[in-house]
Structures are given as C-alpha cells and as structure tokens.
C-alpha cells in the first residue's frame, strides 16, 4: 500500500516538473502569448458579474441596478388630479370722494362688486380597480366644484366624488373610462424599515415624476388627522405628490403619499418654532387606504365603532419617568354608550376586552375596528378604585364624510 502511494506521488511530481519546464520555455520563446493568456484568465470572473446583475434586473428582483420594471408596472395606474373651485371675492378699489372730511370718515378705499375667481389645486391619485375607482387625499379635492383626472396615456376624464373621510384624509373618486389599468397591491406583509420605495406623483404640476428612497420609520403619529399610522420615507414628496403612490421595489402599492415635513422653520403664532428638515415624507399604509375605499364604495361612509368619549394619554405622574399605559377620559358625550354605562370624565381606561390599552392611539384604532353594536368590557380606575363597565358601541359620527 505504501509503495503504491509513493509511485503515485512520483508520477504527479514528474508531470508538475514537466509543466513548469514548458511554462519556462513558452516565456522565453513567446512572452506575448503568455501575457494574453494571463489577461484572458483574469477577465473571466469579472465578465460574469454583469451577466448576473442583468439576470437579476430581468427577473424584477430587488437588486440595486435599476427599478425601471417596478416603475413601468405601477406608473400607468397613477394619475394627475386637477381640482377646480370657484371662489367669490371682492377687490378693494379707490373711493372717489371730494370732501376730505368724508374721506377721513369712510376711508380711502371701498369694497368693490362681488367677483369670482377660479382656483386650482394639484394632486395625484391611484386607480384601484379597472372599473374606475380612484383613491386620493381628501385635502386635494376638498371644496372642489370640478375634478379632472389626467391618465397616463394623456386621456382626460371628469371625476365624481363617491365619498371622503376627513379622519384619514382619504377620498374616493369615480371615473367612467374604459381600458383602465389598476395598481398592484402588496400582500399582507407590512413595510419594514430599510425597504426600498418609489414615490410616484405629479410634484408642483411638472408632470409624472418618480423619486426613490427607503422606509425610514413606521407607525408615525403627526396629529394631522384622527387615525394615523404613517409610513415615513426619505423619497422626495412635494406639493402635488399628495394622493400618489408609494410602491415597493416590485412596483406594488404599499402606501398613499400624504404629507411632508416642512423644509423651512415654521411658527405656530404663539412663539413656538418648528425647525425645518429634509427628506421626511409620510404615506398612509395601503391596508388603511383599502379599508376606507371598500367601506366608502359599500356604504358611502366609513363605519367605525364609538365609545362616546374623548380621551388622551395619561399624564406622567410626579416623580415618574414614563407615563402610565392607558387613556384618561376628557369628555363624555350625552346619550352616548359611555354615558349610558356610567363612565365619567377623569376615569382612567386601562383595558378593553381584557387587553391592556397602550395609549390613546391604541384605543382609538381598536375602538374604530369594532362594528357598531359590539358589546365590550372596559376596565377603569376612578379615584384609585377599580371599576368595570360593559357597553354596546355606537357608530362613530362622521362630520367630515360627504358623498354622492
């Protein structure tokens, strides 16, 4: 056994020596040939990299090479919205008075006749279905007398308002046009911080524009509307982007672009200054948007459960470093479910149906998700004494909802 191994090693050694000898001879006889062979072998691995990258792009992967496939998939379903409104106004005009005393008493200017001007607001929208339902922001079309929708293929359609929901700043429009594309909606997976996203819309009216960024945060609360669970992104969102699409790297809708943080410092009229910031935009998650769309199409309004109270986060107690979980009742509406059950202002709401209440936002969302008529159990503290109330939810009033 040992002798056979020695013979094998000797055989391999002879071939190695022969190979080195041949390489030496080639280097003396034809140095150029040796250089060409060396270059060819060094380029071979690098040549495979573009091919791999190209394969990833053609397969619509999440790779960093190009997002053209995602844009071409989503962009046809994003529309430009022009909301027109007739606004009455009066213009000051010089008062023709010869008597100086009369001029001092009545002033130099007087109000002219009532006139009208046409105001136009710009925004974007997303086609959710091939039969013409379009979702946009409520603030884009609020108060409009005429709404025009410009499609990706430059067709123009007049839109009618099916319903609006001021509490989420969403509105549902309907256009009666054939051969419409519909946006692809991401599955149930929630957006994660670090995901690549594309914002598609009509910023400042210059035409359809795509910007890219990542998801910077989720679950943001801005106190702009009652129900908020914003996706934060650094993809550029400008005036005119409102109502447009925020899509993932596959061109699937994950949110409706809604707001941007001011780029310059702003004052609130009480001396408080909010510093400006760059790259902070917000979108409504697609799950919220689709729920509002479905309810408005089905009912004309968004149906939410309602306890019949106003509440806020529990203040931080003296000496404590964090606030206590739960919510404190600020106001009880007469004839509402909470009033009938005996809940009072000042009560601390700690649990709903046996689950801890985290804060006012948690309670607001859980309350709204329940159907009117649902019976719930609230566990509270009143003056340090535990109390339990059972009540049936009413339907939340919707003063901001309108429709045809």
Image (tube, rainbow, N blue to C red):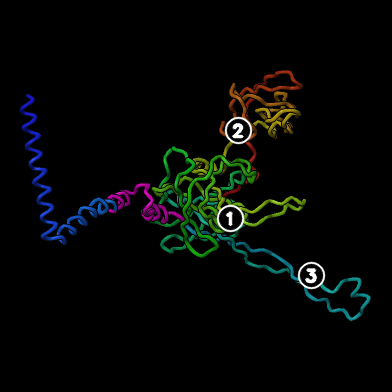
Helix, strand or loop: magenta stretch: helix
Q: Residue furthest right?
A: 101
- The answer to which quarter of the image holds residue 388 is top right
Q: CA distance from mark 3 to mark 2?
A: 51 Å
Residue sitting nearer the eye, 345 or 52: 52
Q: Between label 3 and label 2, give the one nearer the viewer.
A: 2
Q: Residue furthest bottom?
A: 98
In the image: residue 74, left or right of residue 359: left
Identified at 66% across, 52% down, the residue is 275
Q: CA distance from mark 2 to mark 1?
A: 29 Å
Q: Is residue 399 above or below residue 92?
A: above
Residue 141: numbered disc: 1
Q: Which residues make up the magenta segment?
A: 50-78
Q: CA distance from mark 1 to mark 3?
A: 30 Å
Quarter of the image where the N terminus is located:
top left
- The answer to which quarter of the image holds residue 355 is top right
The residue identified by callout 2 is 362
Secondary structure beneath dot 2 equals helix
Q: Verify whether residue 60 appears in magenta.
A: yes
Residue sitting nearer the eye, 159 or 306: 306
Q: Between label 2 and label 1, give the one nearer the viewer.
A: 2
Q: Is residue 102 above or below residue 245?
A: below
Q: Is residue 36 above or below residue 117?
A: above
Secondary structure beneath dot 3 equals strand
Identified at 81% across, 71% down, the residue is 110
Q: Verify whether residue 187 appears in magenta.
A: no
- Looking at the image, is mark 2 or mark 1 earlier in the sequence? 1
The residue identified by callout 3 is 111
- The answer to which quarter of the image holds residue 267 is bottom right
In the image: residue 34, left or right of residue 215: left
Residue 170: numbered disc: none
């Amino acid at each position: 056994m040992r002798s056979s191994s020695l013979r094998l090693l000797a055989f391999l050694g002879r071939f190695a020596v022969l190979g080195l000898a041949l390489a030496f001879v080639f280097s003396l006889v034809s140095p150029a040939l040796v250089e060409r062979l060396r270059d060819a072998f060094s380029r071979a691995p690098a040549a495979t990299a573009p091919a791999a990258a190209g394969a990833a792009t053609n397969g619509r992967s999440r790779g960093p090479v190009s997002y053209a496939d995602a844009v071409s998939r989503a962009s046809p379903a994003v529309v430009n919205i022009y909301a027109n409104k007739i606004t009455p106004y009066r213009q000051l005009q010089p008062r023709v008075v010869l008597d100086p005393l009369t001029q001092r008493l009545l002033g130099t200017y007087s109000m002219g006749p009532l006139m009208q001007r046409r105001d136009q607001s710009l925004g974007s929208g997303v086609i959710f279905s091939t039969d013409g339902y379009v979702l946009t922001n409520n603030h884009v079309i609020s108060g409009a007398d005429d709404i025009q929708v410009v499609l990706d293929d430059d067709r123009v359609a007049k839109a009618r308002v099916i319903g609006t929901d001021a509490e989420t700043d969403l509105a549902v429009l309907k256009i009666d046009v054939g051969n419409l594309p519909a946006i692809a909606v991401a599955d149930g997976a929630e957006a994660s911080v670090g995901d690549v996203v594309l914002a598609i819309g009509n910023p400042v009216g210059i035409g359809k524009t795509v910007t890219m960024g990542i998801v910077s945060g989720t679950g943001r609360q801005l106190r702009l509307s009652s129900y908020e669970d914003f996706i934060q992104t650094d993809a550029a969102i400008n005036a005119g982007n409102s109502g447009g699409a925020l899509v993932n790297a596959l061109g699937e809708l994950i949110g409706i672009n809604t707001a941007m943080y001011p780029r310059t410092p702003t004052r609130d009229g009480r001396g408080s200054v909010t510093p400006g910031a760059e790259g902070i935009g917000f979108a409504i998650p697609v799950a919220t948007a689709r729920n509002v769309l479905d309810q408005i199409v089905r009912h004309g309004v968004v149906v939410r459960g309602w306890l019949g109270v106003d509440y806020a986060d529990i203040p931080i107690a003296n000496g404590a470093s964090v606030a206590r979980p739960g919510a404190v009742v600020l106001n009880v509406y007469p004839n509402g479910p909470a009033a009938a059950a005996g809940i009072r202002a000042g009560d601390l709401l700690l649990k709903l149906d046996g689950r801890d209440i985290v804060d006012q936002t948690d309670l607001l969302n859980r309350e709204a998700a329940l159907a009117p008529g649902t019976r719930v159990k609230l566990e509270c503290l009143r003056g340090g004494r535990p109390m339990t109330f059972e009540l049936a939810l009413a339907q939340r009033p919707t003063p901001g909802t309108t429709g045809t």
